[in-house]
Image: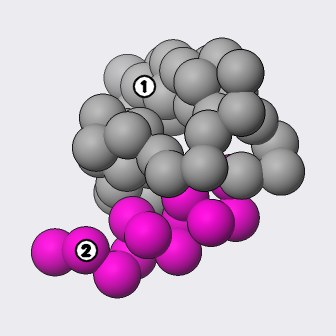
Amino acid sequence: MVHNNPTPDSVQTQRDWTRTYQALADNPTTSNTALRRRLIHLSRQLAQDVPRTQQPDLRCRAEDQP
């Protein structure tokens, strides 16, 4: 299934992934098991929902929208 336009859910998932990744980067030494698990979950969801060729476009759309 090829997406020409990512769904709003996919865009939101990408935003959540970016925020979670940033939270891990901001606090690398604290106990962050929950953040790592969340990042893995979101990564799997994105891999299932969005073809690899469409992922760069999804990241751009997620950054552009408020």
Q: Residue flagged by tag 2: what amino acid is it? A: Gln
Camera-side residue: 17 or 8? 8
Tell me which numbered mark, 2 or 1, is placed earlier along the sequence: 1
Taking 19 as reference, is 66 left or right?
A: left
> Mark 2 — residue?
65
Camera-side residue: 65 or 40? 65
**Could you tell me how far apart the alpha carbons at marks 2 and 1 are, in whole angstroms?**
22 Å
Marks counted in the figure total 2
Rendering quarter of residue 47? top right
Say if 26 sits above or below 7 in the image.
Answer: below
Specify whether residue 22 is in view: no
Instruction: Name the magenta segment's main secondary structure.
Output: helix
Q: Check disc 1: other Cα within 10 Å, few if <14, some if 14-19, many if 20+.
A: some
Rendering quarter of residue 61? bottom left
> Mark 1 — residue?
38
Q: Which residues are magenta?
A: 55-66
Q: Measuring from the top left, give residue 44's x and y in whole percent.
A: 63, 20
Q: Measuring from the top left, give residue 28's x and y in whole percent.
A: 53, 56
Specify whether residue 63 is in view: yes
Q: Secondary structure at mark 1?
A: helix
